[in-house]
Each structure stands twice: as structure tokens, then as C-alpha cells.
Image (cartoon, rainbow, N blue to C red):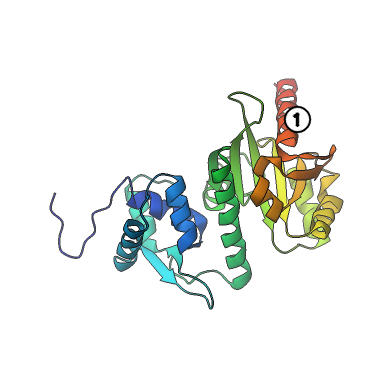
Amino acid sequence: MRYHKGTIAISRSRDLPMLRQIHYSAVVSHSQLFQFMLAGHYEQNLESFDWRVRRLVKHGLVRRQFVAGSESLYTVTNAGVTCLEMHGDSYVETDGSGPVSEASQLLHDLELNNIHLSLLRSGALCNWTPQARLHAVVSRGFAAYQKAYDAVAEVMLPGESGLRGRIALEYERTLKDAARYREIGALLDKEQNVDLILYLTGSPQACERIREQMGRRCWRICTAMVEPFKGHGLDVEVTWSAGLTTLGEALRLASQGTAAHKSMSA
């Protein structure tokens, strides 16, 4: 097939996964994007990767931006969203016309990418649903989650051959006020479609604050430090209603409780 001069031929196996990842990351750094493409076996060569990114930027599907002291940061444009929709991606709402988010949200989104990558490297991750997609389906009533979490991760349960557990992830870079946590806690107390709700924070004090405001209300909520989580994945130590344990063990126990609850409700 011949293409008009100035147009771009989209590769389903390479361009679309890259465009999709940039969109669902909200913002992603150059090195993070390369790691995502490596993990998905979409790209194995840095030179080829660099060429592909430059090509998407040149044709206006991706915007490259810089923040002082950072590497290149990428966001999807409205043209990029349209391209995804034309190739069958549903519920890909975004503005796509503005610059990267303000500093606090930017740092939150970049760290969330690191959290995602750490689960990919662990080999336990089966599926990752990002907030952009969750917001689209929750707001339309197509998913019965209580809120649009930062992400929902489906992982293989340790020691349980073939069985999976579902974790709602919330990365709290900055804490909310007590009233807001009580409001969220009341909402999450009704959550039935995840096995565990994991709050990742940067300090033990922040973990304790979240547990004080919500953890005693909703037994599915657990807390952990973000840096140990990135290093240990499902083996990280978490605190939840049953005390201290590993995330994998908490998930195993919680999934049994969820299954029992659904059985009694049926």
C-alpha cells in the first residue's frame, strides 16, 4: 500500500503498543517507555526505539516535553487518541492538547510507571488496567468498581497454581485530609470487585495515617512503603486488618474471603 507524502504508516505490532502505553501512562519518561517496550517484547533495540519515538513525535501523535533536570517526557496528543480509536481502542478519553500535568501530579504519574514496571519485572503481573481506562469505564457505568483507582493489577497468586488475585493500587505521594479519607473509606467498604486495596506511600507515618482513617473500616485495605514494594513485589511486607504479612499472603487470604462472600451473597 502506498501512502501520501507526509502521512505515517502505523504498525499494529510496534507503533500502537507504544502509543497505547504513552496514553495510559498519562506521562512517561524516555527510559520508562523503553523499559515498557522491552517488557512487552515490542522493541529490543534502543536505536530502533529512538527512531520510532521520533517518528510519532514528528507526525504529531506524541508530544515531547522537558521539565528542568529531566529526560524527555511524552504525552499523547488528540491526534494520537484519534489514531488509537481508529485502530479499535475503546474508552480512550483524554484531553491530549495541554502540557504535562503540574509538578505534584507529574511526579505521581512517573512513580506509578515505576510501580507498574516493577510488577512487570516480577513476572507475577497478568493484567494492568490504568486509571485512564478505569475512569472511562467507571464513569460510564461499565465497571462496578467503587472508584477509579490509580490502577487495578491482576496477578498470579503465589503458591496457588493458575489462580489470580486482583489488587486495586493507590499511590499516595501526598496525603489527603482526614475528612476525605473517611469519605473514601466509606466508599471502599462497599468494594466487591477487587480482593485487596493496596495503598503505597513514602513513609511509615503516611501508612499509619491511612490505616487510622480507613484501614479499620475496610478489611481489604492494606498499606506498604513504595520503595520496598518496587524491590520485592508480592513479597513486600504489608500491614492490614490481620496484622503484618507479605502482600502475596494477604492477597491469597483476601481472595478466599472475597470468594466466600460472593458465595454467601449468591
The extreme bottom residue here reads: 68
Q: Is residue 132 left or right of residue 58?
A: right
Residue at horizontal 67 percent and vertical 45 percent from the top: 232
Give the image quarter of residue 221: top right
Q: Residue at x 59, y 42 (%)?
A: 153
The spot of residue 167 in percent (x, y) is: 65, 40
Q: Quadrant of residue 260?
A: top right
- Category of crowding for the residue at label 1, using alpha-carbon neighbours closer than 10 angstroms: few (below 14), some (14–19), many (at least 20): some
Report if residue 95 is visible in the image.
no
Q: Quadrant of the C terminus?
A: top right
For this rendering, which residue is in front, 182 or 173? Answer: 173
From the top left corner, tell me how far across and down residue 132 is, in percent.
Answer: 53, 53
Give the image location of residue 181, x and y in percent: 79, 55
Which of 238/265 is in front? 238
Q: Is residue 144 visible?
A: yes
Q: In the visual, does 25 lie left or right of 90?
A: right
User: Residue 187 in the image: x percent, y percent?
Assistant: 74, 46
> Which three-letter amino acid code belongs to the residue tagged 1?
Leu
**Tally of numbered discs:** 1
Label 1, secondary structure: give it.
helix
Determine the residue positioned at 39% across, 55% down: 19
Image-based side of 226 in relation to 7, left or right: right
Residue that carries the numbered disc 1 in the rendered image: 253
